[in-house]
Image (cartoon, coloured by chain):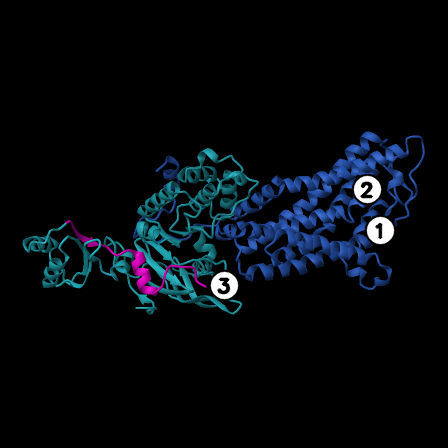
């Protein structure tokens, strides 16, 4: 299963509130060529409203180029992109006030305080009300936990603080869509947890979050949907559950009686059985209509198999990625 | 959620899940000016800007003290052979002339160099730090951002000129006698008349920098390095000034932006000779239009990859 065509999985409605076709980002054949090399090639992306969408790929796979095209910073060589139902970059002025973005790391005025940085970015938005500016800036700083450092010059900030300030600038207004390019870069584990919490919180408010990352477990922990890019092409997209389901979970039984276990499991339709003599672990693929695991376990015990551990090991997104690309998750050459 | 969040949510378009998207927030004309205000604040809070203004303010102090020392024993300043306006020798008679002398001294290089630094850095500096992409997704709008940048550079032109004038007036009035003003044409006018002429000259000097400001802005849209844009603009200024002083190249000199810069001295005659002043203003307008359009063409179509 190497390099399959990009599957156009229409995501299942979540909670019955997502009308089919309500997408916040939609691209058709989007492509960008830089001096002869295709950074992004024929991208058909659909981000449903209300999703936390993981945009996954190794460094250099075209994620940031795609994001820059979506934000109207660079012109596509071919194809089209629609954000919040309007064409980009044409409708930038109408679309972007409703979009908060963190693109390729934070960028700040080092000689200004954190607060003044936000005031500046906010006044760049012609739809931002100057009367509520101070309040909104304070709220954004509070939300990312920077209130205490608001008056400090940004050049004195650590990378993690800069990242937070970048996030704060994306949160200056209520947004319909948040585009976060590698938002946890440079953060310590505690900071990463906080950002994940923040993303979940924002998603609960109804904001669609488009999150790019090269960290598989990050996507797995917060995202409802995901798309995978490699070498400028979209490999797959769909719900995280669907992607992981591509590789069905394997049954794993730890037992000192592997031979008997294999026999019993085979009788119950478990295929591709493997017994590891060292660990005493027997693994296998469950059939398409899996038997009740309680009964399967009872059957093992009835047959005299001593069971030390028993369970289904869920496939991770990393398994799915490796299965999809047929290669490791490394930097594209 | 904090209290501030609820404030935002009230009346604003917080979109609950699944509800249709509200229309775009309205763009209020007055709010559009917010970017210009922010631009000004940013430029004038930079240590570099303040340093440039400090250097400019220092020039009249140096010139004033030098003249004071030289004329201490009733001597006079040596005649001026540089071809520039004959302001220096008048300073010891009238402190107001220190303003004119200082403008004549800073206009060839110091003043335009500081404009070159600010203009060259305007777009390229934002690109270098990456803040350009955040301004554009705010969204500042490319044309609006370019206009705000140009306006702030022009504001700096005025501020730089006024810095020289104010510093010169303070130093001149404290070191030298002040009284009625003897013009270059020999006639004498009242001090008030002299001060008014001085203000007009400050305005003309600031306008002389309009063309260079547009040129610097254009160069600034070409690169993602603030330093290269500054260096290129200042380098170009020096080259043009050299070409402007090589007699053999007189054929092209009327088209060079600094060619009529010193025409401001004609305001110090009675009657005022306007031809040079008008030629200067027209030339600056042409440069501003040409390089302003070039900057617009470049900046509105380029890919922002920084």
Subunit that carries the residue with mark 2: B
Q: Residue at x 80, y 39 (%)?
A: B99
Q: CA distance from mark 1 to mark 2?
A: 17 Å
Asked which secondary structure carries label 1, the reply is loop
Disc 3: which chain? A
Q: Confirm or deny contact between disc 3 and disc 2 (CB under 8 A).
A: no
The residue at the point 91 percent across, 33 percent down is: B71
Separation of disc 1 and disc 3 at Cα? 52 Å
Q: Which residue is mark 2?
A: B100
Residue A142 place in picture, x, y as percent = 41, 37
Residue A197, x across and y down, in percent: 34, 43
Chain drawn in cyan: A
- Magenta-highlighted residues: A308-333
Q: Secondary structure at mark 3?
A: loop
* Foreground pick, A159 / A29: A159
The image's mark for residue B273 is 1
At a point 30% along the width and 63% down the height, the residue shown is A323
Q: Which mark is on residue B57?
A: none
Which numbered disc, 1 or 3, marks the residue closer to the eye?
3
Q: Colour of chain B?
A: blue
- Residue A252's spot in the image, x, y percent? 19, 55
Which is nearer the N-term, disc 1 or disc 2? Answer: 2
Above or below B281: residue B3: above
Q: Quadrant of the N terminus of chain B?
A: top left
Q: Report if residue B201 is visible in the image.
A: yes
Alpha carbons under labels 3 and 2: distance apart:
50 Å
Query: For residue A75, which numbered disc appears in the image?
Result: 3
* Secondary structure at numbered mark 2: helix
């Amino acid at each position: 299963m190497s390099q399959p065509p990009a599957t156009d999985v229409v995501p299942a409605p979540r909670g019955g509130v997502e009308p089919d076709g309500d997408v916040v980002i939609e691209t058709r054949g989007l492509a960008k060529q830089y001096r002869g090399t295709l950074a992004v090639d024929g991208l058909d992306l659909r981000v449903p409203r209300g999703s936390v969408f993981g945009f996954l790929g190794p460094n250099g796979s075209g994620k940031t180029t795609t994001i820059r095209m979506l934000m109207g910073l660079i012109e596509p060589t071919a194809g089209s992109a629609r954000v919040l139902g309007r064409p980009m970059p044409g409708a930038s002025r109408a679309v972007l006030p409703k979009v908060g973005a963190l693109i390729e790391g934070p960028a700040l005025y080092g000689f200004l305080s954190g607060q003044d940085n936000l005031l500046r970015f906010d006044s760049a938005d012609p739809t931002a009300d100057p009367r509520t500016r101070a309040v909104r800036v304070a709220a954004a700083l509070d939300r990312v936990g920077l209130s205490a450092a608001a008056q400090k010059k940004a050049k004195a900030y650590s990378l993690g603080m800069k990242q937070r300030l970048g996030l704060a600038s994306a949160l200056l207004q209520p947004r319909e869509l948040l585009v976060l390019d590698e938002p946890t870069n440079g953060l310590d584990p505690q900071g990463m947890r906080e950002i994940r919490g923040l993303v979940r919180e924002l998603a609960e408010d109804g904001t669609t979050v488009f999150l790019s990352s090269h960290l598989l477990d990050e996507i797995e922990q917060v995202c409802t949907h995901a798309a995978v890019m490699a070498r400028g092409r979209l490999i797959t997209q769909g719900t995280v559950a669907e992607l992981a389901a591509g590789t069905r979970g394997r049954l794993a039984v730890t037992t000192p009686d592997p031979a008997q276990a294999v026999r019993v499991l085979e009788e119950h339709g478990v295929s591709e059985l493997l017994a590891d003599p060292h660990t005493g672990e027997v693994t296998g693929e469950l059939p398409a209509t899996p038997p009740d695991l309680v009964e399967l376990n009872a059957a093992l015990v009835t047959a005299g198999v001593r069971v030390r551990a028993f369970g289904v090991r869920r496939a991770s997104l990393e398994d799915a990625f490796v299965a999809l690309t047929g290669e490791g998750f490394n930097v594209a050459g | 959620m904090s209290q501030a969040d609820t404030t935002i949510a009230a009346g604003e378009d917080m979109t609950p899940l699944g509800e249709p998207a509200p229309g775009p927030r309205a763009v209020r004309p007055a709010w559009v000016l917010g970017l210009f205000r922010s631009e000004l604040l940013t430029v004038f809070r930079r240590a570099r800007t303040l340093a440039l203004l400090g250097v400019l303010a220092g020039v009249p102090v140096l010139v004033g003290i030098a003249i004071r020392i030289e004329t201490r024993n009733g001597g006079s300043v040596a005649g001026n052979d540089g071809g520039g306006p004959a302001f220096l020798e008048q300073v010891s008679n009238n402190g107001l002339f220190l303003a004119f002398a200082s403008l004549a001294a800073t206009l060839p290089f110091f003043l335009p160099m500081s404009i070159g630094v600010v203009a060259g850095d305007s777009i390229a500096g934002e690109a270098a730090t990456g803040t350009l992409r955040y301004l554009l997704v705010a969204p500042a709008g490319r044309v609006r951002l370019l206009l705000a940048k140009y306006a702030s550079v022009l504001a700096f032109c005025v501020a730089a000129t006024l810095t020289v004038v104010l510093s010169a007036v303070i130093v001149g009035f404290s070191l030298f006698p002040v009284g009625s003003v003897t013009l270059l044409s020999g006639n004498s006018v009242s001090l008030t008349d002299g001060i008014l002429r001085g203000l007009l000259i400050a305005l003309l000097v600031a306008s002389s920098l309009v063309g260079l400001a547009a040129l610097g802005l254009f160069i600034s849209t070409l690169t993602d390095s603030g330093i290269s844009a500054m260096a290129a603009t200042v380098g170009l200024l020096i080259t043009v000034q050299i070409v402007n002083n090589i007699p053999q190249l007189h054929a092209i000199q009327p088209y060079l932006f600094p060619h009529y810069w010193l025409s401001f001295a004609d305001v110090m005659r009675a009657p005022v000779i306007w031809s040079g002043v008008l030629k200067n203003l027209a030339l600056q307008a042409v440069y501003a239009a040409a390089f302003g359009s070039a900057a617009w063409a470049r900046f509105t179509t380029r890919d922002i990859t920084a």
